[in-house]
Image (cartoon, helix red, strand yellow):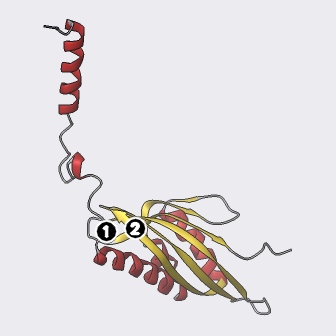
Amino acid sequence: MLRAPPAMLQLAAAVVLAAACRPAPREGQPAAADAAGAPLSAADQAAIRAADTAFSTAAGAGDAAGLAAMYVPDASLMPPNAATVQGREAIQKFWGGFVDAYQVNITVTAEEVEGHGDLAYSRGRYTLGLTPKAKGAAPIRDEGKFLEILRRQPDGTWRYAVDMYSSDLPVPK
């Protein structure tokens, strides 16, 4: 009969113990096995699409505070040709510059919404019309794509954690 060396038995015991030892979940958090969560429900997907509609509505109303409220407090906004804008306050200031200078008309169309648990992403297209509030300035039109990462909030709403967009139009010369 073959016997395993004592070192092998100790190693096997250590592996079994390590696999069995998991930290207890903190109160209010799912167990580690449930951390990934279930796939998004149809209601979650609809709520994420509704967040994009609320964003478009706030932009059209010139409501920088309403736009910023669509983001989690530590969100990142990644506009094209600019540095990342970090945090809700800075994001409100960024969008405030847009709505102060332009009447904004934006349509956001999510082509894909996926996720699990409290984390999701939305990928899609936008069309943007900016009518300058200053007399004599020409309107601006843009179209492009976006990628958003969203987090479900304790109240069940979805907010942007990362928002990145870029134009499909050539850079003006």
Identified at 37% across, 64% down, the residue is 115
Outermost residue toward the right?
173
Identified at 57% across, 78% down, the residue is 125
Q: How far apart are marks 1 and 2 (CA)?
A: 7 Å
Q: What residue type is labelled 1?
A: Leu
Looking at the rendered image, the quarter that the N terminus falls into is top left
Residue 162 x, y percent position in the rendering: 49, 62
Q: Earlier in the sequence, mark 1 or mark 2?
A: 1
Locate residue 24 relative to residue 130 in the image: left or right.
Answer: left
- Most foreground residue, 118 or 129: 118
Above or below residue 172? Residue 8 is: above
Above or below residue 117? Residue 22 is: above
Label 1 sits on residue: 40
Above or below residue 53? Residue 81 is: above
Residue 26 x, y percent position in the rendering: 20, 46
- Most foreground residue, 12 or 1: 1
Q: What element carries label 2?
A: strand
Q: Which mark identifies residue 80? A: none
Outermost residue toward the bottom?
135
Q: Is mark 1 on a helix, strand or loop?
A: loop
Q: Quadrant of residue 74?
A: bottom left
Locate residue 98 relative to residue 39 in the image: left or right.
Answer: right
Q: In which quarter of the image is residue 77?
A: bottom right
Label 2 sits on residue: 114
